[in-house]
Image (spheres, helix red, strand yellow):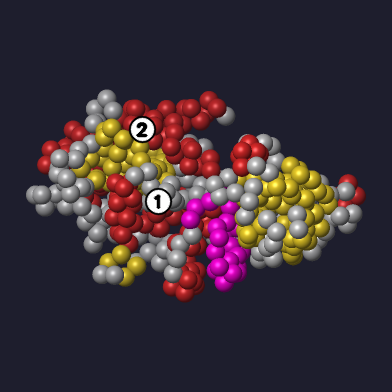
Amino acid sequence: MISRIAQGIGRTLGRRPAPEEEGETRPISALLRIACLALLALFVAVPIDAASVRDVEIVGDSITLRFDAPVERASAFTVDDPRRIAIDIVGAHAGTGGKAGGRVATIRQAQFDANTARVVLDLTSPAIVKGGGFSTDGRSLVLEIDRTTPAAFTRSTKAARRVFEPPVAVRAAAPKRSDRSAVRVPLDRDRAGGPPLPRVIGARGTGRPLVVIDAGHGGHDPGSIAADGRQEKDAALAIALAIRDELVESGRVRVAMTRDRDRFLVLGERREIARRLGADLFLSVHADSAANTAARGATIYTLSEVASDRVAAAVAARENRADVLNGVNLGGENEDVSSILFDLAQRETMNISADFATLLQREMATKVSFKDEFHRFAGLIVLKAPDVPSVLLETGYISNDDDAKLLFSKGYQRDVAQGVRRAVELHFARQLASN
């Protein structure tokens, strides 16, 4: 049902918004904003007792936010490139925009987390919040903005948030967050409940970290094909199984595989398996290909909506097409709805993924050759779980005869697996030490 609604929205509007900073919303049409905010009620648990952002009004350099009940507090901060002022309202859920004016070009709203609404003001010129406060009844917040220089605005993005609290009496009387809330429903669960969850093996006890290994392609999707006819899906599965066996042997983590045989999964299902299992790390295994048959070496990808280079963009385009067969999108993956979930994700997940990519290359490089630019960024659908650190490992070029021989050799598969094992052990050891 969600996928059908999302596809209808996508067909009607036919465009994809650009990524934003700090999990904010994107500039989208009024129709899409209303439809997507309705869908967000399915994705984010919003306390029933929370107030609503009823209206946002701008008169000159004065911004008034009105609520239908008292809220807990608010904070404002600036974000550059493009210039924006973001306002987080704790104890509230988002409304549907507002009337722009003055230095504000557009107003956008979305639910940042279960208890926080975010209002984003896109600016026509550099401006900062110079003051403000709540009304005596706590049902409105007035902020005063003032123009500034581009350099001063950039400096303001590194400053602490400005925090605003309603009167003490209002805070004491405000409804407290209730445990009664909507259930958070993952994006892909509408497809007959999603694929069956795989068996978790390895270390005993639910307290051990869980690594989900994804063997790329499968079934009717062979992936790239070597000159001798061997297929990427088979190399990916063999390497993924070797990694599984190494991690199980370590006895330090729990392990699950999205597929352990030759079967097809759409990209969203692979990501969703990791999320439904509550994975601590997601590793997708692939083999690269290129028109230049001399290209060799492994590469590691982490998520970014902006590709790091043309090669990364081409890889993302190729891998993301795995859900399309004879022109039919098998994934039901609506980019506008997916991007909203990505907007709500914490930046920390992407940072952890990037850190693990560096560690993974270091531990594998003793026996596995990498390209000079070993870490690339791309908008790969399979990596878009907002709450699971995820990397995609291209283990070599199947389009290169020498790499292809390695990809299908037991020795190379073991070398890759042992490097992954060391990286995984160090990754979770570091997390344990930091905690």
Residue under pointer 1: 379
Place of residue 75 in the rendered image (x, y in percent of width and height, measured from the top left): 72, 46
Q: Which numbered circle lies on residue 360? A: 2
Which is more N-terminal, label 1 or label 2? 2
Q: Is residue 293 visible?
A: yes
Q: What is the CA distance from the residue labelled 2 to the residue labelled 1?
A: 20 Å
Which residue sits furthest left?
A: 228
Q: Residue at x 40, y 58 (%)?
A: 269
Left or right of 106? Residue 220 is left
Q: Nearer the viewer, residue 133 or 435?
A: 133
Place of residue 370 in the rendered image (x, y in percent of width and height, measured from the top left): 26, 33
Q: Residue at x 39, y 30 (%)?
A: 359
The secondary structure type at the circle numbered 1 is: loop
Q: Is residue 286 above or below residue 37?
A: above
Place of residue 285 in the rendered image (x, y in percent of width and height, measured from the top left): 30, 45
Q: Residues within 10 Å of mark 2 (few under 14, many from 20)?
A: many
Q: Residue at x 52, y 56 (%)?
A: 341
Place of residue 380 in the rendered image (x, y in percent of width and height, measured from the top left): 38, 51
Q: Is residue 242 visible?
A: no
The secondary structure type at the circle numbered 2 is: helix
Viewer-side label of 2, 1:
1
Circle 1: residue type? Gly
Tell me where residue 391 sits by quadrant. Answer: top left
Magenta stretch contains residue 293:
no
Circle 2: residue type? Leu
Left or right of 5? Residue 263 is left
